[in-house]
Amino acid sequence: MLKLLTNAEVYAPAPLGRNHILVAAGKIIWMGQRLPKLGPELEVEVCDLGGQRLIPGIIDGHAHITGGGGESGYSSRVPPLPLTRFTRDGITTVVGVLGTDDITRHPVALLARVRGLCEEGLSAYCHTGGYHLPPVTITGSVRGDIVHIDRMIGVGEVAISDHRSSQPRFDELLRLASEAHVAGLMTGKAGLVHLHLGDGERGLEMVRRALDTTELPARVFNPTHVNRRRALFEESLDLAERGCTVDITAFPVEDDEDAWSAEDALLRYLEAGLPPQRVTVSSDGGGCLPVYNSQCELVRIGVGDPGALVGCLQTLLRRNAPLELVLPAFTANVASLLRLGGKGVIGVGADADLVVLDGDARVRDVMALGRWHLRGGKTTIRGSFEEAES
Ligand code: ZN
C-alpha cells in the first residue's frame, strides 16, 4: 500500500521545510510541498504529521547485536539485542561487531543475527573479525569475507592501545588495512578498518604512522571510542583533518572522568572547524562498559544501550544545538562513510527509513523500509520471541 506522510517538517538532514512524502515499496518515491494528485484506484494510507519533525532513520555504526561482554566470566556474556531495542529509539540501520569475545562468538553467528534483523525489517550489516589478530573470519581472509559475503562491509572492531588487544604490530595493522581497502575497491563497500581505541597512552600513533609512511588512504582507518580520553580526542581531531572519519561513542560519562560525553565531543568537533562530514556517533549497544583498576582487574561492568544515540541527540537539542547541525553525525555521515546508498537522507529514491520526533524530540513514529515499527510511541512490529508490551 502507498503511504502518504503529510505536513512533515523535513530535516533531510538539511532543513527543507514543510513537505509531503509518498512512500511505496520501501522507498520514498515522491516529495513536495503541494499534495500530489492520487487517483481513487490507488489504495493510500494517509498519515498527517501535523508539522512534527521528520528525520532520516538513525544509523548505528557500532553495536554488539549478538550481545558483547564476556570480560568477567561466561555469565557476563550479554544476550542478543532484540529488534525493538533499535526501532523504539529510531534506529533503522545497524552495523554489528564482535569485540573482546571473538572466540566464544564468531562472525558466522554475527552474520546470522544480521540476517535475522533484516528478516524482521531492519537494515543490518556487520564487520568481520573482532578485537584480535589474526582476525576471525568466515572465508579464511578479511578480503574474502568482504568480497564474498553480502552483508560484511569492513573489519573490526580491531583493538589497539588497549590491554585487551592482541598488541598488533604496525605491519600487521597495515596488512589488515590493505585487505579491507582492496576489498572495498572490488565491491564498492566501505572497506574500513574499524578501530577500537582503548585507554592506552599510545593512542592513535600507529594510524598517524600509517598515514605518514604508506599509500593507504586515510578513510580506511576509522577509529571509534575517541572521546574516552580527552588527549585521545585531540589526536583524533588531527586525523579527521587528514581524512579519517572519527567515531564518538555515546557511553555514559561521569563529571570527574577524563573523557568527553558524546554531546560535548560532537560539539567540540563541530566547533573546531573540521570537515563536518568526518564525524559520526555510535552506541556500542550490547557491548559491556567495563572499568578496570591499575592491574587491569575488573572493578565494575555495565551494558551499552542503543537508545543512547537518540538520548545524545535530545541532549544536544536541549542545549540549543540546531538539529541540522548535529543530525548528520547520526545519519548522513554514517551512510556516506559506510557507503550505504539510499540511507541516512530523506529524498526521492532514498529508502523509507524515517523517524518522527515530537515537540520534546521524543521518538514518536518509526518507519523502516516503508513499514511502521512504532506509531504514537507504541511498538507495532516486534522481533521474534519478543514479549508484547502489557
Ligand atoms: Zn570497543
Image (cartoon, rainbow, N blue to C red):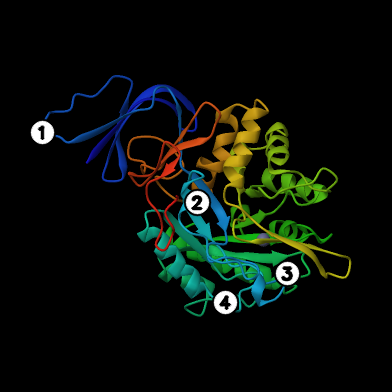
Question: Which mark is first along the chain, 1 or 4?
Answer: 1
Q: Residues within 10 Å of mark 3 (few under 14, many from 20)?
A: few
- Whether tag 2 and tag 4 are in contact, CB under 8 A, the answer is no
Left or right of residue 347: residue 335: right
Q: Amino acid at mark 3?
A: Phe
Residue denoted by label 1:
41
Q: Residues within 10 Å of mark 4 (few under 14, many from 20)?
A: many
Picture disc at residue 86: 2
Question: Which mark is first along the chain, 3 or 2?
Answer: 2
Check the image and name the residue furthest to the right: 294
What's the residue at 37%, 46% (across, down)?
380
Residue denoted by label 3:
170
What's the residue at 32%, 44% (across, down)?
370
Mark 4 vs mark 3, CA separation in Å: 19 Å
Above/below status of 213 relative to 306: below
Which quadrant does the N terminus fall into? Answer: top left
Q: Nearer the viewer, mark 2 or mark 4?
A: 2
Picture disc at residue 8: none
Task: Label 3, secondary structure: give it.
Answer: helix
Task: Label 4, secondary structure: give it.
Answer: loop
Q: Quadrant of residue 276?
A: top right
Residue denoted by label 4:
136
Mark 2 vs mark 4, CA separation in Å: 26 Å
Residue 353 at x, y percent in the picture: 40, 43
Q: Quadrant of residue 83?
A: bottom left
